[in-house]
Structure formats: structure tokens, C-alpha cells
Image (spheres, rainbow, N blue to C red):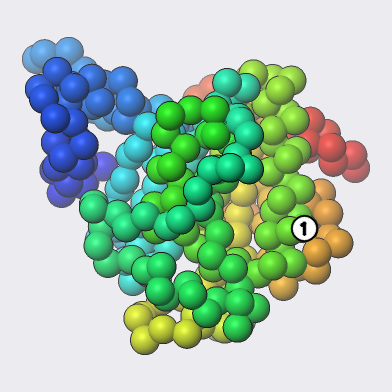
């Protein structure tokens, strides 16, 4: 974590807690940030990330840590480069009556706005979220998924098809396993394949997305979900290796890769090869 990112994180914690006790509690308990004992070299562990958060993002990215997820936001592309969160049986809830109204982020102002997404359907896109609201509807922090730093433009076919199907497969896995770690983010190809949103603001609409799922025991599965995937495409047809995603994104996943990640979890997600 860069020094500037740590300073910005402290500013966020300062703003969101209204006294010293709450600030300390937020820092140690809610944000997932773990500090060493006095006199030790300072190291930071973000508990939303399994075996360490991804490495390889720009030093200009904003690292945002919230009670239910962490992400690295790229202001040039106007999308998070990665989002990490842990879903548990207790965090999943009913979201049918919960607001989806986008929230401006007081931490990062240089994002796409609600107005930038207003005419997204005109070019075949929807304002979507990396972290789904259902996964945290059972917590008091569900509204944090509505921050614009968690928003991205996604096609209707992918949103209603493979993306939605994979999210439900993850929830079913959580109900059996207790908790599951998820990493998600965009894939940008050398030549853009997606239309731009109808805004003058500089941005890139992702050409595809990645999703990596890891159980608490270390079983993992990875998927690349192309934006042009028809609604009938099953998420199991989009499985890949983690190495494939690293090559496509330039990121390195699980930098603290000890112990070695165990057997694949494709069958746990309903994918039988």
C-alpha cells in the first residue's frame, strides 16, 4: 500500500467516525485494516482479500477500504481495477425493497456520475455494481454498494445471464461452505470493443470482466465474462485459469500465496467438466 493511500484511508476513517473511540473501532474492526503492535514494523492486512490484495495497479489508483469490500479505483478509466469482498451466510439478505440510488463518493470525486449513466441503455448498457447488493443486504452496510466507485457499465445480456447466474452460484456455495472470497474487475482489450457512455467525461467501458472465487479452504475457480455474451450463455462456459486473467489484466493475484491454493472449485459452483 502506498503512503499516499494510507493517508487518504486515514482521512476517510476520520470523516466517517465522529469521535476518537469510533475512529479507532472503525479502523481496527470495520475497515478490515489490521495494525501491528507498538514498536513493530507497520504492515497492513486487508481482510477482504484472500492471501493478499492484487498487485500491479497504477500508483495513481485510489485504494478504498469499506466494511464490506475493498477496491482499487482507476480515475482514468472510471472503474475499479479490482474489487475484493467476502460473502458469508449472515451477510446475504433480501434486497427487493432496498434502494439502488447511486451515491457520490466523498473519498474519490473523479468518478462517473449518476447523470453519466442516465442514457446508458441508449448504447446497450446498464449501470451495474461489482459488489452485488443481495450479498450484503443482511448487513447494516448494504448501501455502500451504491457508491459510484463500485459502479460500472455492463450489457443487459451479461447482467441478466452469466453474471447473474454466477452470483447465485456463489450464494449457493456460501450456504454450503459458510463464507467465500470474491475478486472481480474489468478487462480492457488493446482495441476497445464496447461503445462509450454518452458523456464527455474521459472513461473506458470494460470489454469483459473477471471473477475469481475462493473458498475458505482455498478451493478456487475463475471466469472471464465477455460483455457481448448472450443472455443464454451459462457462466460455466466462461471458466478460465487465474493465470489467464493475470495475463489479460497485468495484475498479480494472491501475492501472499502460502499455502498453495488447493483444488479448483468449479464443481462447487455447478460446473461439471
Residue 271 quadrant: top right
The C terminus - image quarter: top right
Relative placement, left or right, of 77 versus 136 is left
Is disc 1 placed on a helix, strand or loop? helix
Within 10 Å of the Cα at label 1, are there few (<14), some (14-19), or many (20+) other Cα atoms? some
* Residue 248 visible at all: no
* Residue at mark 1: 161
Q: Residue at x 33, y 25 (%)?
A: 30
Q: Is residue 26 visible?
A: yes
Residue drawn at 67 percent across, 26 percent down: 174
Residue shown at 18% from the left, 31% from the top: 17
Q: Residue furthest front?
A: 97
Quadrant in which the N terminus is drawn: top left
Location of residue 65 in the rendering, given as x and y in whole percent from the top left corner: 33, 39
Residue 181: % across, % down: 56, 32
Residue 123: % across, % down: 60, 83
Rendered view: 218 above or below 137: above
Q: Residue furthest right?
A: 273
Q: Is residue 39 positioned above or below 126 on the image?
A: above
Q: Nearer the viewer, residue 96 or 108?
A: 96
Q: Is residue 66 above or below residue 35?
A: below
- Number of numbered tags placed on the structure image: 1
As drawn, is 184 to the left or to the right of 30? right
Quadrant in which residue 9 is drawn: top left
The residue at 86%/62% (across/down) is: 232
Q: Nearer the viewer, residue 177 or 20?
A: 20
> Horizontal and vertical percent for residue 101?
46, 56
Amino acid at each position: 500500500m502506498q503512503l499516499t493511500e494510507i493517508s487518504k484511508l486515514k482521512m476517510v476513517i476520520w470523516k466517517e467516525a465522529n469521535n476518537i473511540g469510533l475512529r479507532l473501532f472503525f479502523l481496527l474492526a470495520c475497515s478490515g485494516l489490521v495494525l501491528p503492535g507498538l514498536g513493530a514494523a507497520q504492515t497492513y492486512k486487508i481482510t477482504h482479500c484472500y492471501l493478499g490484495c492484487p498487485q500491479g495497479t497504477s500508483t495513481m489508483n485510489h485504494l478504498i477500504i469499506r466494511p464490506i469490500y475493498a477496491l482499487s479505483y482507476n480515475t482514468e478509466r472510471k472503474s475499479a481495477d479490482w474489487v475484493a469482498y467476502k460473502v458469508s451466510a449472515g451477510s446475504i439478505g433480501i434486497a427487493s425493497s432496498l434502494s439502488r440510488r447511486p451515491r457520490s463518493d466523498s473519498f474519490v470525486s473523479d468518478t462517473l456520475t449518476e447523470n453519466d449513466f442516465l442514457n446508458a441503455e441508449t448504447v446497450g448498457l446498464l449501470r451495474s455494481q461489482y459488489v452485488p447488493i443481495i450479498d450484503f443486504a443482511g448487513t447494516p452496510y448494504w448501501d455502500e454498494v451504491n457508491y459510484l466507485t463500485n459502479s460500472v457499465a455492463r450489457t443487459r445480456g451479461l447482467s441478466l445471464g452469466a453474471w447473474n447466474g454466477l452470483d447465485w452460484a456463489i450464494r449457493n456455495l456460501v450456504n454450503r461452505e459458510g463464507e467465500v472470497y470474491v475478486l472481480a474487475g474489468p478487462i480492457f482489450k488493446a482495441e476497445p470493443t464496447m461503445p462509450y457512455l454518452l458523456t464527455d467525461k474521459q472513461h473506458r467501458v470494460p470489454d469483459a470482466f473477471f471473477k475469481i472465487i475462493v473458498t475458505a479452504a482455498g478451493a478456487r475457480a475463475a471466469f472471464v465474462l465477455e460483455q457481448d455474451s448472450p443472455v443464454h450463455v451459462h457462466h460455466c462456459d466462461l471458466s478460465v485459469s487465474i493465470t489467464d486473467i493475470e495475463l489479460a489484466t497485468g495484475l498479480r493475484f494472491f501475492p501472499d500465496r502460502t499455502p498453495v491454493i488447493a483444488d479448483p472449485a468449479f464443481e462447487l459452483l455447478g460446473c461439471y467438466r
